Image (cartoon, coloured by chain):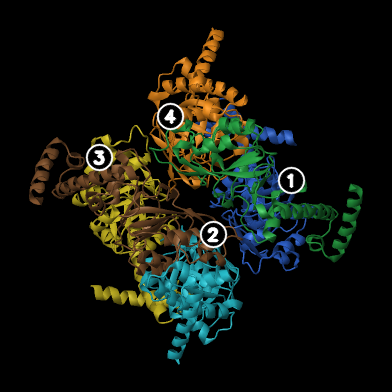
Chain colours: A blue, B orange, C green, D brown, E yellow, F cyan
Amino acid sequence: MNGTNWQCNTATVEALGKVSTATLATQLFRRGFRTRFMQGVVPLKPGTRLLGAARTLRYLPMREDLDTLDTLGARTNAQRAVIEDIRPGEVLVIEGRSDLRAGSLGNILALRLQVLGAAGIVTDGAFRDSPNIRRLSIPTYAAGQNANTNLTIYHPADFDLPIGCGGVLVELGDAVVADDEGVVVIPGQLVDEVARDALEQETAEEFIYDLILESASVFDAYPMNDEMRARYRIWREGRNEEAR
Amino acid sequence: MNGTNWQCNTATVEALGKVSTATLATQLFRRGFRTRFMQGVVPLKPGTRLLGAARTLRYLPMREDLDTLDTLGARTNAQRAVIEDIRPGEVLVIEGRSDLRAGSLGNILALRLQVLGAAGIVTDGAFRDSPNIRRLSIPTYAAGQNANTNLTIYHPADFDLPIGCGGVLVELGDAVVADDEGVVVIPGQLVDEVARDALEQETAEEFIYDLILESASVFDAYPMNDEMRARYRIWREGRNEEAR
Amino acid sequence: MNGTNWQCNTATVEALGKVSTATLATQLFRRGFRTRFMQGVVPLKPGTRLLGAARTLRYLPMREDLDTLDTLGARTNAQRAVIEDIRPGEVLVIEGRSDLRAGSLGNILALRLQVLGAAGIVTDGAFRDSPNIRRLSIPTYAAGQNANTNLTIYHPADFDLPIGCGGVLVELGDAVVADDEGVVVIPGQLVDEVARDALEQETAEEFIYDLILESASVFDAYPMNDEMRARYRIWREGRNEEAR
Amino acid sequence: MNGTNWQCNTATVEALGKVSTATLATQLFRRGFRTRFMQGVVPLKPGTRLLGAARTLRYLPMREDLDTLDTLGARTNAQRAVIEDIRPGEVLVIEGRSDLRAGSLGNILALRLQVLGAAGIVTDGAFRDSPNIRRLSIPTYAAGQNANTNLTIYHPADFDLPIGCGGVLVELGDAVVADDEGVVVIPGQLVDEVARDALEQETAEEFIYDLILESASVFDAYPMNDEMRARYRIWREGRNEEAR
Amino acid sequence: MNGTNWQCNTATVEALGKVSTATLATQLFRRGFRTRFMQGVVPLKPGTRLLGAARTLRYLPMREDLDTLDTLGARTNAQRAVIEDIRPGEVLVIEGRSDLRAGSLGNILALRLQVLGAAGIVTDGAFRDSPNIRRLSIPTYAAGQNANTNLTIYHPADFDLPIGCGGVLVELGDAVVADDEGVVVIPGQLVDEVARDALEQETAEEFIYDLILESASVFDAYPMNDEMRARYRIWREGRNEEAR
Amino acid sequence: MNGTNWQCNTATVEALGKVSTATLATQLFRRGFRTRFMQGVVPLKPGTRLLGAARTLRYLPMREDLDTLDTLGARTNAQRAVIEDIRPGEVLVIEGRSDLRAGSLGNILALRLQVLGAAGIVTDGAFRDSPNIRRLSIPTYAAGQNANTNLTIYHPADFDLPIGCGGVLVELGDAVVADDEGVVVIPGQLVDEVARDALEQETAEEFIYDLILESASVFDAYPMNDEMRARYRIWREGRNEEAR
């Protein structure tokens, strides 16, 4: 995967392609992180999943003389510049300032990102042309939808600097993982261990889920007491055998 | 139905299983209540309906030393304790403090409630694991979705005390009724009369609906003028005959 | 179309029936307007489109002695009066004061508007009976859903005066255009030129869309550079030929 | 007093010049009113008191082509028109839409109102030139301060129609009473009785205050039990004697 | 001091009577606490300081049939009950649900608390009769001011249970310390050590303050580098000598 | 004045030291700018005035592993680095993300800035140690006060890049002017002309103020009609004579 700031091994990518953002949030909480899930950012359509390395775009409040239609074609326009620079597997993460009064991006730019192989687009602002963006295959996450052009409220400042998005600090190359619940950002140096432990947690939860279905009490099964834990270890072994 | 603080006759249960929350809100307004519909609490999936007696769970702001992963298994944990104490027909109503920065509950606890026969789960906070909760059959209502564990913002304080949820005072055993619009809570002593009058109101509105379809003016039909009211009484009689 | 304050020619109606609100927002921005898209107002169901001339209804905060169930049948009730006065092709736009604590309107009144041939209903408040309103064919847009009757928070003041809705000044007869993204309001005197230029813009964007699909850079294609613009003119001509 | 829609006797004016808004809110609550105190509207400087009859000014969201500097001098400008029409004893109440992004009015217009003998100015928006307005003697109440001209967000629509201000329905001629806590609006037909009962309540509370100072329990004194009430009647008589 | 759940030695009380809430917040942060300062709660007048042990009062949303003027005198009224039960040195902390649409408490009850020797009153709602409360000597902290009686929005539920106030978990007997910046709540078991270290921190900051006045760079002085720390130790010794 | 990106002549500095932010906002509006006044940012104490060239500090959401007490002394800490780099006449403007849950800066750093000759400090977040900051002479503007250390919510990212503050784009060297109403930021290239025209406007308003005091109508005086304008020119001349 391009653009990562983390050691990207196959097991990690496979794990992050499967586990839920809820599980990742738990693993991050275990490591002292409380605020790595973006507030209020949801997929544009159900059934969306995203995994990629963060590229960042920073928006500031617009200034009427700087942010005019004439500037859209300029190579110095940070929005256009970062889009043209995207490589496959990267996710464009936009600091939309939690401002929903305009769209951060419309469907033509979203299509360009899709053609370039981007893994997804994330903003804590809104999208415009959202009905058309919903028809694209690229995973998209936002806090709203708004037909107004980004020029009405935003000045595209720069890219690849650290930004804030949905209350989360996002650095270039951080792992961005999303499902139908929303978006988690994993700091680069933790990606491999978080991915591994998240997968292990979900395996245990699969076992717990079955216990609950068989009417186990949460006091016994979630978290597991000693007896359940022993049963789990046996089940876990059996499963590993099968897998071989 | 378990856990009610109201006289629970068959006609009441049948009526509350049918009428809309809008009709119930009107009946409550007729009795002087303006704030019995929860603000901002919606079903996790369309086509949801809920009826049950309230069990209450109170959340407070977390304190870092009290709210750790170690406490999840404790029998004194109010969240776990109330869940294990739920009986069929009861609805778990959570005071989530209108705080969407974390989930109030995840899918394993939701499954446990489903297995125990709970009538539903309601929070004015968020759920976590919401994509998995959507796959369960238990009716669920919330103000948002968030992957963060409840430990990041909540301290589970106690249960079965009166709480506030979505701006509504909820007492143990109150009737909780919900449809795709949201959640209404009926004080125990009023449940039977509100149910009866709501059903009568919907019968009349069925008649009015047909009048409107036939191009009646709202000045004549909604509310009905004397002539319409006379016609309604005849229609109503005829219908009762049929039903015999 | 009834009730317009704009010169309503066939080409305009045809164009406004097709173009997206995002395109209209861009055309309005070109003319110096930044705030003609309603904030937070979305369709009650996907696949909704609306075009009509604005009729306006103004709500104020309720006063307990004025806003009682007894007033619903009065011919002086501004809500009822404007509804009975609606003509085909008109859109009822309600100043709901961005207040979501009650519904602005329920399904029986919505049905009446549908029977009268109204082009749609727009509020920056909520609807009540929203599950039933969703079953109607009339296009409906709102900022929320709430079972409480409008009497709990609103006093219907008057109609056909200028109002604010979703942060937009709406005058009697303004063109209201909406799609799945939301609602744009075009001042009467600009409707024809905005419609014409919006259609032209969407034709160009169709061409650009194909360029992007063929891996053109946004620096070349969006906005188009001189070369692309030349190619576009030829394509445009060809298309016009076909159309003849 | 000019412009009242209430019977304005001397006792009423004297009472309303003394009693607190808290007392008035209690008297209104006794009559079924819960929302006659403006939310978030406070005096620009401490020690402010206001009493007058409401004149209303309605603001809508601005439209860029309508709300330009050129319109400020026009006699049709609703803001200027209502100001020039103010008579002594009237209060200008502005529907500022709870929008604090600009000022509703600046110090020159405030001065003009002071020269005309206006009893005060109230807005649920902001003032601009607020440091200079603070230097005037006219009582002023607002929800904020902002240097931006009203043209940046407002379109002055019309005046003397009913409006909403701070969540309160305000009709032409309603009694506006304000102290350091904020602003209460009394519907015209209730002004005299509310004024009379408010004065009586404050007399009783003076007595209660002394009881509390002498270490009476609130269970005995607030509300008064039978014994205290008897003592109060004697004290009240004595006081009336003195006053003769 | 009455009502504490902490070991209340003289040094602790002396220290907490002097140090700033900013210093206490730093000491709590050092121990892993990020959220012990109340959000948005400020003194009613400048120059206020408060120290006491928390008594808690819990408010819920009102219910029209439960929360009437008739209930004010009842001994079961939780608001009245807790007030009459207050002992000298205790602080009444009210869970006002961050709701500013009414007052939590008025001046007569505040006076009663003052007479009883309460150390202060804290709410994350509003006060009513705030101009009169400002004239009392009892320290008061709130998030706003509002003339509406608490019955318009609140149901007094119970007292001495844990509550949330300004986003902080408050337990019976916790130490409440406030200055002109706002309110910090220290969990009982930490009070002594936090008080001691806060005092030490302020002593060091006094030294640092003088260094900065003498043009020291923050890189050298704040935090102190080794050289400064050595100088500080000498200064600190000297001071201790003086104090003996 | 240090650090300006504008031509800083004496007349400009003199004018900007006198005129109100309301006048500057009008001059900016005349040039097409609607959003150069910071939303919600007010002086910590009355009687404050500020003029200087912007230095910018950018805060992002904190990350628990990056933002610890250990980092405070590091020369790479952007907050400390920009402070030590401040020159006389510069204003530190902080992008506090409109987040009031912690302080952006405390009194020791504020003192350091004062010692270095900074013209002021502006944040759209809060200050901590605000009671002590109020005792300093350096002009300070913020949106709130909060005792929590900035580490609880902020990561100091970098400095001297363009930022957003209070909804305003602020670039290195922009002119920052503030009075008791709040803060205006003037883009560098416009400073001289805006200053000159603002001074001229205030001279005219002085004349208008006297007209209003003499009972002129706003229709005649504000804006001035031809007659008034003629009188003004004479008065203006006379004044200029005097000044010579």
* Viewer-nearest of discs 2 and 4: 2
Residue at the far front: name it.
F227
Looking at the rendering, which quadrant does residue C227 occupy? bottom right
CB atoms of marks 4 and 3 within 8 Å: no
Report the quarter where the C terminus of chain E lies.
bottom left
Amino acid found under the numbered disc labelled 4:
Leu
Please give the name of the residue rendered at 51% of the width and 78% of the height, measured from the top-left corner: F86
Looking at the rendering, which quadrant does residue E214 occupy? bottom left
Indicate the position of residue C3 as horizontal and vertical percent values: 64, 43
Same chain check for tags 2 and 4: no
CB atoms of marks 2 and 1 within 8 Å: no
Amino acid found under the numbered disc labelled 1:
Val
Same chain check for tags 1 and 3: no
User: Is residue E217 in view?
Assistant: no
Q: Secondary structure at mark 3?
A: helix
Q: Which residue is mark 1?
A: C13
Same chain check for tags 3 and 2: no
Q: Chain of mark 3?
A: E
User: What is the distance, in whole Å, between disc 2 and disc 4 at their CAs?
Assistant: 39 Å
CB atoms of marks 1 and 3 within 8 Å: no
Q: Which residue is mark 2?
A: D153
Residue at the far bottom: name it.
F244
Q: Chain of mark 2?
A: D
Amino acid found under the numbered disc labelled 3:
Ala
Residue E81's tag is 3
User: What is the distance, in whole Å, between disc 3 and disc 2 at their CAs?
Assistant: 49 Å
CB atoms of marks 4 and 1 within 8 Å: no
User: Is residue D57 in view?
Assistant: yes
Instruction: Please name whichever residue, B86 or F20, is drawn nearer the observer in this view of the structure.
Output: F20
